[in-house]
Image (cartoon, rainbow, N blue to C red):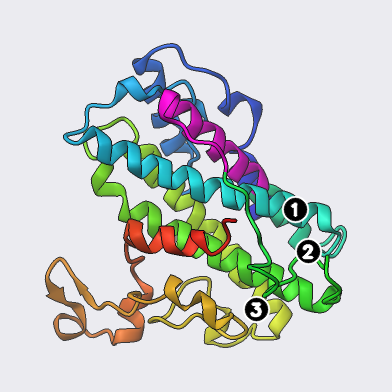
Amino acid sequence: MNIIKFLDEFTSDNLTQKVSSRRDLFGTLGSLSKKAALVAVPFGLASTKANAFVAQDQNAAIGALQLALTLEYLEAEFYIKALDSGVLPSGGRAEKVYMQISKHETAHVEFLKSGLGDNSIDSPEFDFTVGGMFDPFNENGAGQEVAYAQLLALAQAFEDTGVRAYKGQAGNLMGTPFLTPALQIHSVEARHASEIRRLRANVLGENLNQNALGWITLNNRGPGMPEATQAVYDGEENIIQGGVNLVDATDFDAIAVSQSYDEPMSGETATAIASLFIV
């Protein structure tokens, strides 16, 4: 199925309607899981409130959702600005992918704000140039080609951060109604990351080699990625899962093992990465 049409199924109006009870809430979630277990977007859960928490540590759950909301604010604003910048080739695949991702990130923001209720936080002010280091929207004369490359590179860094950050906060959401939808958003972010990486491969002419893959290999950030993004990838070289060294226990090498798992990212690391873009 065409990815644009596939993702569009999860941004339609019938998925954003409110649900009036927990039974309806989890019924909606179940139907989404049946529709596409790896790409379900829990927009139908938007009426979940913070008083639904049953976490062992409520503060940890709230903190996890506030971190997620900060990252979603960053991504949502980034894609809106990207689409308004004129840097994306008009009518091309990149523009269509960015439009779909933008819809998702905006919906994620609304879901998290609704879920946090009175514990919601306002969006920070963002500087996507990082003090002039980047010019992804071609506002300072970098030129279309340079700006486009930076637009894709930053998108990849943001999406890869989101994937790992959601997984890293899963433990803090245990025992709450938000664990399942958070992990589903994690899956959506992973699909975003894969699409962005393939767009970058096309631009870089890397279509037929290891760099064209839609996932991370070891802790390699990939060609054309700024050194400042290395923190996003450190730790992805892990080959131990559940206490088992999978290289020793299987016929797969470290490259294959690392490609098979998304490694969790700590809240501290995710915050430090996001802080680079917060004024």
- Location of mark 1 (residue): 81
Identify the residue at image location x=38%, y=75%: 259
Q: Position of residue 154 (x, y in %)?
A: 62, 67
* Predominant SS along the magenta part: helix
Type of amino acid at the residue the image marks with label 2 = Phe
Type of amino acid at the residue the image marks with label 3 = Ala
The magenta stretch is 102-123
Horizontal side of 142 relative to 32 (left or right) equals right
In this orientation, does residue 37 appear?
no
Secondary structure beneath dot 3 equals helix
Residue 207 inside the magenta-drawn segment? no
Q: Position of residue 211 (x, y in %)?
A: 55, 83
Earlier-in-chain disc, 2 versus 1: 1
Q: Residue 235 lies in what quarter of the image?
A: bottom left
Earlier-in-chain disc, 3 versus 1: 1
Give yes or no for contact between labels 3 and 2 (Cβ–Cβ under 8 Å): no
* In the foreground, 106 or 116: 116
Q: Is residue 275 above or below residue 108?
A: below
User: Foreground mark, 3 or 2?
Assistant: 2
Q: CA distance from mark 3 to mark 2?
A: 20 Å
* In the foreground, 165 or 213: 165
Q: Is residue 217 above or below residue 16?
A: below
Horizontal side of 68 relative to 3 (left or right) equals left
Secondary structure beneath dot 1 equals helix
Horizontal side of 163 relative to 8 (left or right) equals left
Q: Is residue 234 above or below residue 87?
A: below
Check disc 2: other Cα within 10 Å, few if <14, some if 14-19, many if 20+.
Answer: many
Earlier-in-chain disc, 3 versus 2: 2
- Location of mark 3 (residue): 201
Q: Is residue 146 above or below residue 122?
A: below
